[in-house]
Image (cartoon, coloured by chain):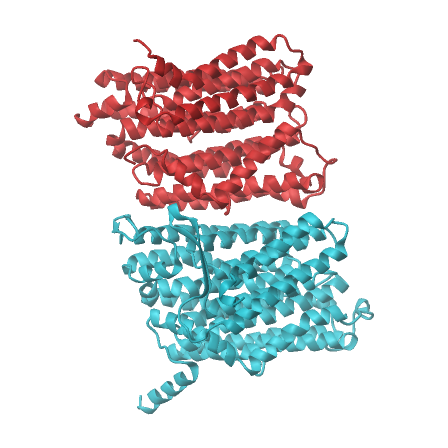
Amino acid sequence: MHLDQIPILSVVTYIPIAGAIVLIFFFPKERTGAIQSFATVVAGLDFVASLPLWFAFDRGKAGYQFVERASWIPSLGVEYQFGIDGISLVLILLTTFIGFIAVYCSYTAIAERQKEYYVLLLLLQTFMIGTFCCLDFFLFYVFWEVMLVPMYFLIGVWGGERRLYAAIKFFLYTLAGSVLMLLGVIALYFYNTTGFLGYKGLGHPATFSIEKLTAVAAGMPVELQIWIFFALFFSFAIKVPMFPFHTWLPDAHTEAPTAGSVILAAILLKMGTYGFVRFSLPMFPEAIRTGWVIGLMVTLAIVGIIYGAMVTLVQKDMKKLVAYSSVSHLGFVMLGVFALNMAGLQGGILQMVNHGISTGALFLLVGIVYERRHTRMIAEYGGLARQMPIYATYFMVMALSSMGLPMLNGFVGEFAILQGAFAKSFWWAFSASTGIVLGAAYLLWLYQRVFFGEITNPANAKLPDLSLREQLTLAPLVVAAFWIGLYPKPFFEVLRVPSENIVRAVGGHTVTPPALAQERAMHAGSGR
Amino acid sequence: MRVKAAEWLLLSPELFLTAAGLLLLALASFFSKAKEEFLGFLSVLAVAVTAILLVFVAAQPAREKGPILAGTFVLDNFALFFKFLILLSIILTILASIRFVGAAPYPGGEYYSLLLFTGVGMLFMVSGSNLISIYVALELMALSSYILAGYFKAEIKSTEAALKYFILGAFSSGVLLYGLSLVYGFGGKMGLADLAKLYAGTERSNLIVLAILLVLAGLLFKIAAVPFHVWTPDVYEGSPTPVTAFFSVGPKLAAYAILARIFYVAFPKFHADWGLIVALVAAATMIWGNLAALLQANVKRMLAYSSIAHAGYALLGVLGFRTSFGLWGILVYLLAYTFMNFGAFAMVIFLETKGYAAESVSDFNGLAKRNMPAAVVMLLFLLSLAGIPPTAGFIGKYYLFTAAMKAGYAWLAVLAVLASAVSLFYYFRIAAAMFFSEAAGARLQSSYALTAAVLICAVGTLLVGLAPERILEVLRSCVPGGY
């Protein structure tokens, strides 16, 4: 059977939920070993099922691929519509990849209520993949919101001491943002059909198709674009999280169990940036080109980078440190996205993946010592490199990847983002690069305090190094970090066409990064 | 006035239910307390037969269903929808009551027959197309409900609830009646269609506006909108829980039906006058209902405030009555609301083995460990009440927000979605108690009847959320012509 005939996106999306249902009904909760293995097999199977997407994807084709359409609620114009472009493709692969690792890393971390735990992880997996696959705004909203429920329970049941507070804060914050998105969607819907609030509608048949609404929205009067841009802005900005909407993040990330933090950082935050890329940019080009809007976005991004990094610097808790570093890193992504050129956008999207890999790995690593010592305070450690050399090596690689060392993934993304930002304004790039310096500072300082020197705390004297399973959860992330760092071309190829379309839609440069450098050289040469 | 034979047939559901209520009352004296369960099942049967009769009535050709009883009783699809929903709410109430009433030291026969009588009142209400017939039906419903509230007559709280309900209810009926008398005094008409015709040819006058506002106030009391809501928490808390569950659904459905009908049939011309007031009431209701619910430690009071908040959302549909989403939205929303709200109350009943046992949030502690399916189902209801997709509550709210946007009340829509987000906080206090706390007791077992009621609600909540298309189409056909 040819790939075209299989609804492959639906298969990838619903394998985890099918696994969860089997778990519920056929696995007694006492058989924890069987539950773990089964959940791992399901998540692994899902990853394998998602791989053909990468190979069968036509990189040169504009528009969405593997499109599936079915009738859902025709009386509202709602359709079940799945399809992906290069941007969703990399994010889906990231999700299935991280999803597998999240399941596999939980064997020892989660001791009680294991069946519920794996059921929730698998449910979450389905909702996340579904969000990236949706081509119908209504359906997107459904996945977007329902995703919060399993995450709420993951934090609330298996989290740290302040888990209840963190769980409800996470849920309320993100919900408050996303309900405004619903109104934005309704406004778009009416603009496309019968009009509202004095705006004459276009009289088209009712639809929530993202493709159609994007075309319609781009033609809206600029003040309406700005209104709807901000209706969507809150839901995305809270998810990202952009400064000053980030306060839920340190709580949720710190209190969540390791796998929860990994998924939050690696995938859930990407929902926000994905929203900006998929919706805000192509839908509201005129709003975004309005001076104060782009100014505000970039300012928030840069403040996020610097403020996030500075707060990270003073953290005493390793997990909190990694959590705050996300605020800074996601600021980079936002800067790249709002540079509105090819380099910035591609870099931003690639950096979404990179952040998923390196921050996900750092959360895993912190989780590993937490399991051994039940503390995350930096002051409790020191000299771990002697006792746990393998662990120290992995940590080094991922820390370097996170701070953007060449040859590793972070460098490629940050470089492209800075290139894009520089093309817009020297000061954007300049302010952002202070974030890189600070980033190196907090990670190296962390590394120094935790790994170097003598073992001062006797509790650390007998810590076992990584087990085989722990290494197996980390190794794929290291491989991915090197792959993107050394040979990012396949990623840029996948992202090129959709990025070009978006950049063209917002009226920016559509040249590829190397050409951009040439162009700038030409400008410089023509004597300014 | 001569009633034609065909009209008797069209009235058969109402007549049958009345007869069944009377018969039940008579039969009750032959049953000992231990065998009362049978009366419960008998009354379920009676309501089911009524529903079947209603199906036959609904199947009659449209022209024969025109206004009957001298134009005071209409059988349009709008009325039929509400009739079916009301019968459903009564069946659910009885199913949820059987074990509960059986355990209480009070005669059950009266209880069931009173429920049937409220049903009769509501069935007449939603068909009413004349202010007087609406009022009389409303009083039949209200009087029966006052007694139901005080059914636990030896309990202080129950008696207090009944008395409060009665006094405030009578007061609001007085306001309503005063409004009706002004309406009548102005034009000498009582039929809704006649009024619309009359107003079409007259200028706006302050007297009419005053009359309309008085009618509005009386009806807002029945749906428990702020500032006419103060009776709700006390009555909901004090009444026996199945009765509370019933109050939060049945009478509200009927009140919504007549509120919508009176305002879209008789008073649309004065929309400019009542629109802003309804908008402000809706805003106050959503804000206050949700904020007050945040502070409640008693689950029944919390759900009471939550149902106040929901009345506020539903008012958005009344405001948007001219848009294609307004009345359709009310129907969708009330259907969803019936399932989810009754479901949530049914879970309280499930925990409440005897008397007023399970009323604080902490009584839900560790429900996930005591009975996992029950906790999951309750979670479904809570998600639906908070409007999280893919549940019925989300679809319902979607319609109402859409109606508000379309009708030009964008500010109200913004307020509604934010209020809706806030509501998650108190709903999820129950979820947190169920899933995060240690168990507070042994494993819980449900009765078959209650399980059936909960399952009906759960299936409804999921079905409207996941595969609503068929249902939405049917409901669209229930929206009165021209809207």
Seen as rendered, the residue at the extreme front is A1
Of the 4 image quadrants, the one containing the C terminus of chain B is top left
Which is more toward the observer, B124 or A452? Answer: B124
Q: Position of residue B297 (x, y in %)?
A: 60, 35
Of the 4 image quadrants, the one containing the N terminus of chain B is top left
Q: Residue at x 37, y 68 (%)?
A: A295
Q: Position of residue B358 (x, y in %)?
A: 65, 30
Q: Is residue B363 above or below residue A393?
A: above
Any part of residue B223 in sight: no
Q: Residue at x 40, y 19 (%)?
A: B124
Any part of residue B108 in sight: yes
Count of numbered marks: 0
Left or right for A271, reference B39: left
Left or right for A75, reference B195: right
Q: Residue at x 21, y 25 (%)?
A: B197
Which is more toward the observer, B71 or B201? Answer: B71
Q: Is residue A126 above or below residue B370?
A: below
Residue B375 picture quarter: top right
Chain A colour in the picture = cyan
Q: Position of residue B59 (x, y in %)?
A: 39, 27
Left or right for B292, reference B226: right
Spot the red chain and give its letter: B
Q: Position of residue A187 (x, y in %)?
A: 34, 51
Which is more toward the observer, B274 or B284? Answer: B274
Q: Is residue A86 above or below residue B309?
A: below
Which is more toward the observer, B202 or B477? Answer: B477
Residue B71 picture quarter: top left
